[in-house]
């Protein structure tokens, strides 16, 4: 048997194993330790295939398979839907780049187009599933020997001959004995819809895994995917200079106006006629985020289109781009100052926190743009931006956003500022320990329909018994915090258990609380069953 046929059969076998394991583990939601286990087994079996098939893995992307495991661990660590989404995205990007540059090629010197086209190329190959390896790589005449064919045909004929006899004698025996009938029903009385569901998940995971392994271990991946710039779409320094120069002038005008707000703070905002906090901060922040986010790709496209005929043209582009980046930093500072003022007035939310983190990431990438593109090292830019993105996801996992939001807003409550308890109880399990610890300060603050924060937390986190596959550190801590709180309350008032008192009052308003949690879940596009599964 040839080496390629042998490796191809190994890919199909591993894909079937991972398909069955995916149905067993990932069927349970929300994902937790099951996702980490599946990704770890995927990486482990891929490494075994590499050694078993003697696949050369000299590319820089091979190390990203371990980064994928680290991101998968984030799904076990945090319960926040946004954090989980970022972690899963990190896993997909890491595996995609590992497939693209695992055997050959460099990631550090790959251009932006290499990353974009490499991801698309990997996606197309993966979507093909087991078809390429089955059709092009496995020599089935080698794999299925003649004696195996004879034995397979003999077994098939035996099954066909035995089938009608089994049905005939089985029907008679079932009619003759009730115990035997119950045994047959227990063995073969399955739910057809459930069987189809299992088969669908097994085939889906096996299909994707087969395509991923084939693309990473067997497919012929081109070393260079960069698209050369056609001369007909290039621009001279006059056109590029006019675009950047006019934008610099507009940004400069905006910056001059913003300087007084940067140094004037809240007093300047309040003194400006007709300008409220909401108008100055909430409406302005996201527009400034959009400006900053669009300016970076504009500079990259302008540099790609620029037709440099001499060094003076290159120096002029660098000067105009440098001025724009300097002005963008002032715009970023203005945006962050606006968000700071708004948070001081109205508190912290997920949207406000994540857009602030995005602005900091954009600022880091702008600095990297100066250090690479403006220093004639454009080929290093994409890798640095990728590392900055990975670092941002790691930082988000480390800071525990929902707990930070709850802690910040509770501190504001203690200072006598605005406090939205309705929003806090819609946060994920990551915020529950902070909320439980602060229940004495929150007190019996009523929510939408005459129930308290304490009742909402007990309803959501004290009665659920999760599937072990969905175990998550954030959800485990939430349940343990509520349990410890109720036990502590019971010890302090043994003749009137707060646990019983809270649960009795919850029965009167549990549907209202459930509706509120469902509204929150609709924001993330998950089902009602997922919400109630804890």
Image: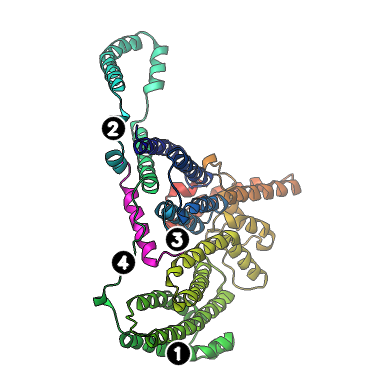
Colour pattern of the rendering: rainbow
Q: Quadrant of residue 134?
A: top left
Residue at image location 37% in from the left, 37% down from the top: 3
Determine which residue is flagged by label 4.
Answer: 227
Query: Which of the numbered marks, if any, corresponds to residue 107?
Result: 3
Residue in the foreground of this view, choosing between 69 and 436: 69
Extreme residue toward the left, this view: 232
Position above or below: 155 against 11: above
Residue 518 shows up from this direction: no
Mark 1 and mark 4 lie on one chain; the one further toward the N terminus is 4
Mark 2 or mark 1, which is nearer to you? 2
Position above or below: 274 against 429: below
Determine which residue is flagged by label 1.
Answer: 252
Residue in the foreground of this view, choosing between 254 and 226: 226
Mark 2 and mark 1 lie on one chain; the one further toward the N terminus is 2
Whether the magenta-drawn stretch holds residue 289 is answered as no
Q: Marks 1 and 4: CB-CB under 8 Å?
A: no
Mark 2 and mark 3 lie on one chain; the one further toward the N terminus is 3
Q: Label 4: few (<14), some or many (≥20) within 10 Å? A: few
Q: Which residues are magenta?
A: 107-130
Q: Position of residue 372 (x, y in %)?
A: 47, 74
Left or right, residue 211 beside residue 356: left
Q: Label 1: few (<14), some or many (≥20) within 10 Å? A: some
Mark 3 and mark 1 lie on one chain; the one further toward the N terminus is 3
Q: Secondary structure at mark 4?
A: loop
Position above or below: 254 against 397: below
Mark 1 or mark 4, which is nearer to you? 4
């Amino acid at each position: 048997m040839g080496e390629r046929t042998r490796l191809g059969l190994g890919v199909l076998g591993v894909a079937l194993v991972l398909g069955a394991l995916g149905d067993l583990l990932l069927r349970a939601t929300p994902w937790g330790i099951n996702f980490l286990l599946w990704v770890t087994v995927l990486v482990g079996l891929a490494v075994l295939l590499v050694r078993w098939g003697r696949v050369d893995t000299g590319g820089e992307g091979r190390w990203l398979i371990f980064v994928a495991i680290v991101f998968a661990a984030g799904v076990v660590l945090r319960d926040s839907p946004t954090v989980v989404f970022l972690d899963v995205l990190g896993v997909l990007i890491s595996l995609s780049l590992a497939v693209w540059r695992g055997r050959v090629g460099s990631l550090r010197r790959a251009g932006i187009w290499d990353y974009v086209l490499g991801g698309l190329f990997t996606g197309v190959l993966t979507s093909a599933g087991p078809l390429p390896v089955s059709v092009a790589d496995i020599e089935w005449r080698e794999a299925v020997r003649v004696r195996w064919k004879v034995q397979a045909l003999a077994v098939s004929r035996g099954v066909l001959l035995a089938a009608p006899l089994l049905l005939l004698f089985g029907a008679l025996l079932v009619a003759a004995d009730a115990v035997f009938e119950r045994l047959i029903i227990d063995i073969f009385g399955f739910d057809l819809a459930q069987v189809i569901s299992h088969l669908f998940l097994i085939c889906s995971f096996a299909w994707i895994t087969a395509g991923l392994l084939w693309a990473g271990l067997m497919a012929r991946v081109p070393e260079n995917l960069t698209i050369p710039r056609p001369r007909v779409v290039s621009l001279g320094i006059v056109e590029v200079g006019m675009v950047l120069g006019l934008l610099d002038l507009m940004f400069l005008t905006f910056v001059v106006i913003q300087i007084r707000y940067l140094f004037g703070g809240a007093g300047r905002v309040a003194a400006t006629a007709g300008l409220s906090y909401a108008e100055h901060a909430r409406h302005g922040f996201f527009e400034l985020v959009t400006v900053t986010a669009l300016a970076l790709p504009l500079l990259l496209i302008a540099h790609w289109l620029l037709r440099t005929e001499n060094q003076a043209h290159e120096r002029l582009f660098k000067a105009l781009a440098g001025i724009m980046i300097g002005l963008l930093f002032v715009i970023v500072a203005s945006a962050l100052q606006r968000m700071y003022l708004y948070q001081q007035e109205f508190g912290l939310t997920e949207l406000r926190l994540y857009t602030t983190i995005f602005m900091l990431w954009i600022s880091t990438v702008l600095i990297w743009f100066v250090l690479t593109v403006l220093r004639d090292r454009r080929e290093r830019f994409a890798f640095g931006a990728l590392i900055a993105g990975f670092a941002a996801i790691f930082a988000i996992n480390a800071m525990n956003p929902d707990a930070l939001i709850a802690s910040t807003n509770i501190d504001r409550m203690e200072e006598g500022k605005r406090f939205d308890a309705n929003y806090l109880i819609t946060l994920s399990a990551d915020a529950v320990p902070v909320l439980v610890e602060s229940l004495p300060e929150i007190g019996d603050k009523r929510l939408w329909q005459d129930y308290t924060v304490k009742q909402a937390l007990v309803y959501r986190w004290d009665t659920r018994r999760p599937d072990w596959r969905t175990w998550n550190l954030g959800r485990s801590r939430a349940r343990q915090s509520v349990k410890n709180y109720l036990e502590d309350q019971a010890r302090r008032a043994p003749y009137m258990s707060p646990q019983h008192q809270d649960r009795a009052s919850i029965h009167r308003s549990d549907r209202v609380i459930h509706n509120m949690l469902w509204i929150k879940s609709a924001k993330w596009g998950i089902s009602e069953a997922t919400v109630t599964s804890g």
